[in-house]
Image (tube, coloured by chain):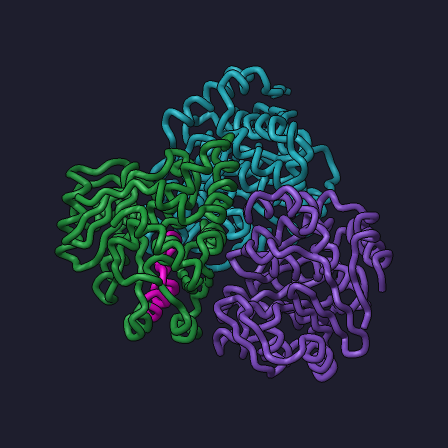
Chain colours: A cyan, B green, C purple
Amino acid sequence: MNGQEAARLFDEVRAKRPLVHHITNYVTVNDCANMAICAGAAPVMADAMEEMADMVSIAGVLVLNIGTLNDRLVGSMIAAGRRANELDIPVIVDPVGAGATKYRTETVKRLLEELDVAVLKGNAGEIATMAGSDAKVVGVDSHGISGDPVEICQQYSESLGVTVAMTAPVDVVSDGRRTYLIENGHEMMERVSGTGCMASTVVGAFNAVSTDRASACASALAVLGIAGEKAAVEARGPMSFRTKLFDSMFNLSAQDVALGSRIKEL
Amino acid sequence: MNGQEAARLFDEVRAKRPLVHHITNYVTVNDCANMAICAGAAPVMADAMEEMADMVSIAGVLVLNIGTLNDRLVGSMIAAGRRANELDIPVIVDPVGAGATKYRTETVKRLLEELDVAVLKGNAGEIATMAGSDAKVVGVDSHGISGDPVEICQQYSESLGVTVAMTAPVDVVSDGRRTYLIENGHEMMERVSGTGCMASTVVGAFNAVSTDRASACASALAVLGIAGEKAAVEARGPMSFRTKLFDSMFNLSAQDVALGSRIKEL
Amino acid sequence: MNGQEAARLFDEVRAKRPLVHHITNYVTVNDCANMAICAGAAPVMADAMEEMADMVSIAGVLVLNIGTLNDRLVGSMIAAGRRANELDIPVIVDPVGAGATKYRTETVKRLLEELDVAVLKGNAGEIATMAGSDAKVVGVDSHGISGDPVEICQQYSESLGVTVAMTAPVDVVSDGRRTYLIENGHEMMERVSGTGCMASTVVGAFNAVSTDRASACASALAVLGIAGEKAAVEARGPMSFRTKLFDSMFNLSAQDVALGSRIKEL
């Protein structure tokens, strides 16, 4: 796993333009749609039970994001996830705010139990909460965890049988056997609502074109991080940074990725 | 129908500032609100059954967009549409994703059957699907149709008794008698989520000030297309293009429209 | 109450980073999230009954915005508001579109009756409608009121026992005893969807760090207005203005606020 591999997968996303079916929150949904397009994928947002089976069946990946969950949406997530499992379409779960309320934590447990999840992608507090470690999640933000992020990801991934991607200043991805650290990104990404959700979209797009979950996740996070680094150069604040983040992703070349990736295998 | 007529209607939108009542999706709803303002109209988004009759009665036009439909919203669309029909307020339908799932296709059929729809505005795949032609719709994107776009629009409009507006690199508008081609626009509009929805908003605004559906639709699409052409000049990617698209629409003069419109009557 | 006090409160928001729990509309929700961050607070959006008690209990303030209300959301607003009242967490109500439909007006009445509301923040038409004065509200826009804004705010605040903040070219804040006029802001703020909702977010953030409702509201509106003035300098239209509004808020210093505030006590 290196920059060349990330670049190759990025090319494949653009060549195949996979449909990323999102069941997601209404806060950052537009960001997810535009980020999917800028990364080279095609977004669709659909959450009505009546069309779950149909929509999932044409998707390359299913992204379940609980940012503004409610029982209707959770029902659709379960139905969509089962259909995706039948069709061998990977399911990505973003446990937004897990740890902040019992409802969120329990819902993520339910998704992990009832579905065959390919990737669980969250921030440090969310992943640590789900892994049973001490963590503080305030709203949808991680306010620190106790324990080593790498160990948490490795052990939790192994016990769960799911690839775990933890976003943080240094991202951690582990499938239980292999563990990657991704050092790309910029602190301004923390100052924009939705970068975590966008990361799940990009992780989804990369997992639609590769069954090697860990390298697909690491590549996706490196690519988004490189786009963030480029965006930060001329940004004057969070919103101009956001504009440039989308533009940078759209304009990113495979060579930018090959040269700019900072992925380390442990 | 020429650029002068489009410019005249544009002036009228700005003079009357019609209220565009949207029942729409949660992906691009903010874009619709801001595009309504930049075009000179006033947006309102309301979808609760409890206020449908009240809200429709003060609107200049009703825009029904099924981008993230569910049964609650469809019920509100039917109620709002009936009230709009009683009050002679035009109803615009955007059949987002028709053809991608049966639920979407059936819902559009139901709206067309139960309501007196003024304009059906969709992309090529959506319109072709509804017209009964072969088309491929993946998610919310058109992936090609079989058959001639102009013939599809003409015949479908005539049989349906509804003005049909098909957005594509060259847009087609037909009311069954007259058919217009609109050659304005820029390919970058395809790289931003929501330009189709924004088009429905602008089509709505223009139909609020004119009962000549075909010329109102052609004018609206020309105006949005010209804004897109201007926005593309300095854009560095999809998101800076989007920022400039709104600014361009806001700054567009009637003269820009008169000179820049490329509308052809067949 | 002067610019120094506004600056002091602004510093306190940034130091304490209060969690602003929103139950809000799906049109401008992303703007509220990003504005909370740029102002120095932390946003969370959650509206499921199942997590209301949990989420409110970690919040610094609860913002209830009825922009796209429905019965499910209103139920969650009541439940969240009661919990906030138990815990002495301030409740801010934004009566979006009150006066446009009976459902909106009645819902605001219900929130004011069933909850102990700290601040009612709306545009001129919304506040005048709730106060029982003649007003015209079209969609979500105020189209003029009869009567004097200052008298309306003073009398309504006194009779209601709630601090009232009315946004207009000159904002008015009254707690029934003290009344402030805030002359900051820029007309471009009227050309962007969501500035009213963002104002409620910022008002929420300031009320999370101060129990002096009137001065917190006046400070919040002054701070947002100053950000708007700075944003307008280089804006080329509504959307580039919006980008700069967020960036300006993020970059605003306490000194900018101390020097730029135009708050007058009557």
Q: In the image, residue C183 lies at what x, y percent?
A: 73, 61
In the picture, the quarter occupied by the C terminus of chain A is top right
Name the residue at 20% across, 50% down.
B174
Between C178 and C160, the residue placed more toward the observer is C178
The spot of residue A70 in percent (x, y) is 51, 58
Identify the magenta region. Answer: B62-80
Left or right? Give the position of A230 relative to A11: right
Residue C90, quarter of the rendered image: bottom right
Residue B6: horizontal and vertical position, in percent? 33, 51
Q: Nearer the viewer, residue A43 or C134?
A: C134
A67 relative to B264, above or below: below
Taking the magenta stretch, the answer to whether it contains residue C151 is no
Residue pictured at 62% horizontal, 35% vertical:
A166
Compared with B266, A246 (above or below) is above
Q: Can residue A75 be spotted in the picture?
A: yes
Q: Give coordinates of residue A36: x percent, y percent.
A: 46, 36
Q: Is residue B139 visible?
A: no
What's the residue at 37%, 67% (across, down)? B76
Query: C118 or A102, which is in the foreground?
Result: C118
Q: Quadrant of residue C110?
A: bottom right
Identify the residue at horizontal 63%, vertical 33% (top origin).
A153
